[in-house]
Every structure is written in C-alpha cells, then in structure tokens.
Image: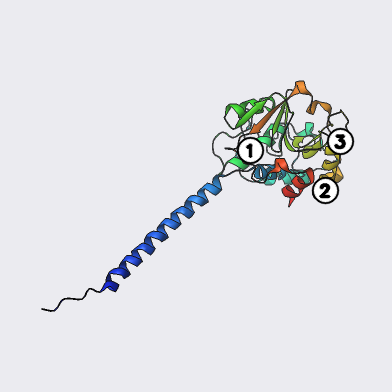
Amino acid sequence: MKKRKIRYDRILIPIIILCVIIFGISSCHKTEEANVQSKSIHTTTDFLRNALKPVGQTLYIYGGGWNEAQTDSGTEALTLGLSKEWKSFYNSQDGTYNYENYMYEIHKGLDCSGYVGWTIYNTLETKSNHGNGYVLKAEEMTKTFANMKLGSYKDSIQNAKPGDIVSMANAHVYIVLCVCEDGSLLIAHSSPPGVKISGTYDQNGNQNSQAVTYAQKIMKTYYPDWYSRYPDCTIDSSFTEPSNVSLFHWNSKTLKDVDKLNSMTVNQIIQTLFQ
C-alpha cells in the first residue's frame, strides 16, 4: 500500500488566509479605537479657535445665550455652530448700536456668560441639544466649573494661561487668549457692543498696554468691518483688579494644550489661532 503524500500547501494556504483575515480585523479594530480616542481629545487651541468664531459678527444682547426664563442655557448655547440670526442682526445695525434697545431679545446675540457657555459647548460637546450646557451667572462660572471637576479654581489671575476663564465679581466673564510681556491680558469677551477682542491694563496700571495694541491690530486685520464701526479695544482696570477677579484653569483631562500655547510668544499664539 502506497503512503499518501501530505500536501502541505493545502494545509498552509488556508492557515495563511485565516491569519490575514484575523490580522485585518485586529488592525481595523485598533484603527477604530484610535479614531475614537482622537475624536475625544479636546484641545486648548480648539477652545480658543471656537471662542474666535462669533468675534466681529455677534452683537451684545443682554440675556443672549440664555433661555427665556433666564435660568439656564438657551437654544443657541446648546447648538453646534454659529446662529445665522447673530450675523443677520449684526448686518442690520451700524456704529450707533445700543444694546439697551434690544434687552432680552435673546436670539439676536450673546451676553458675556452666554458667549463663554456657547464656546465651551462647541468645544466639549459633539451634538446639539445635549445636557444643560454651560451658561451660568458670570461671577459663578470659575468656581462652578471647578466644582464640575473640569479644572481648578484660583482667587487670583496671576500666572494666567491661554484658555483660562476669568470671572468678575461685578458680573462679567472673559476668556484669556494670551499674556503679554508687560503683564497685560489679551482677552475675548462679549461686552457692549458685542463679541470682541480687548486688552487689559498692564501690570503697572497703564491702559495703553501691549495687549491693547495687539487687540487693535487683530480687530483691524481680521475683522475690518467691525473695527470700522467699533474701534475701541480698551477696557477698564476692574478686569484685573485683584479683589474683583477669580480664575478657572482647565485640567488636562478636559483640555490638552497639545500645541504648547503656554510656551509660545504672543505672536506665535496669534499665528496659531488665525492660521
């Protein structure tokens, strides 16, 4: 009786095919995991770029960003993207705009806390109408966000960093874009007439600070229509008054500074945000 020859090729080929299939499935699974992880990473740069989106085209509305009852986030602050009504209302106005004539017409623009709440929502959330949002009383934002475990609270703005949020006891709130060499802060906020970039006093109390110069240059360059109407980029000393301010700093689990904004010069930060 002849011994049957074993055809190793018939055994190996199915094994090879099976290995290829298993490897392919494993690779796809790892890729999907990586994609999910990358989508879940929120960055300081994203936050600040979102903060710039309403700048120069959204007017200040007292109560804007809140719901009708002024108790929680409104429709716009729970929506991804800019409201078309903001730009439409801006286009209908001119340099004489007075927010007192449009009090509580909440869909036409944003107030200070509505603006910050909208920016946070558009950074941390992935779909509209999810949860209660982030619109709160301006003076309570820093402490509340810290209590939500999103970051840390300080009763001082010393060592402020890009992306920090500053609450003011006199009911205002703003976002720090960067810190200048003279100690002045370049900030984004919604204050009459609207969402804009401004500069604080320097550390010696001088109003004509580096931040004001940068704010004027940015508004003139990137938002020329707004600047032609509302060229003032200065703010008063209360924005940095120690007894009037508190600071919220994001933790790395919530926002990662992947671009190392905190190590950049002011010009480098501006270039990164506007590129």
* Badge 1 vs badge 2, beta-carbon distance below 8 Å: no
Foreground disc of the pair 1, 3: 3
* Residue 209, disc: 3
Label 1 SS: helix
**Where 18 sits versus 258, above or below?**
below
Q: Which secondary structure, mark 3?
A: loop
Question: Compared to 28, does 252 lie above or below?
Answer: above
Colouring: rainbow
Q: Amino acid at mark 3?
A: Ser
Residue 96 visible, this orientation: no
Amino acid under disc 1: Ile
Looking at the picture, tell me which residue is in the foreground, 79 or 221: 221
Q: CA distance from mark 2 to mark 3?
A: 24 Å
Residue under label 1: 120
Give the x, y percent position of residue 23.
40, 60
Q: Residues within 10 Å of mark 1 (few under 14, many from 20)?
A: some
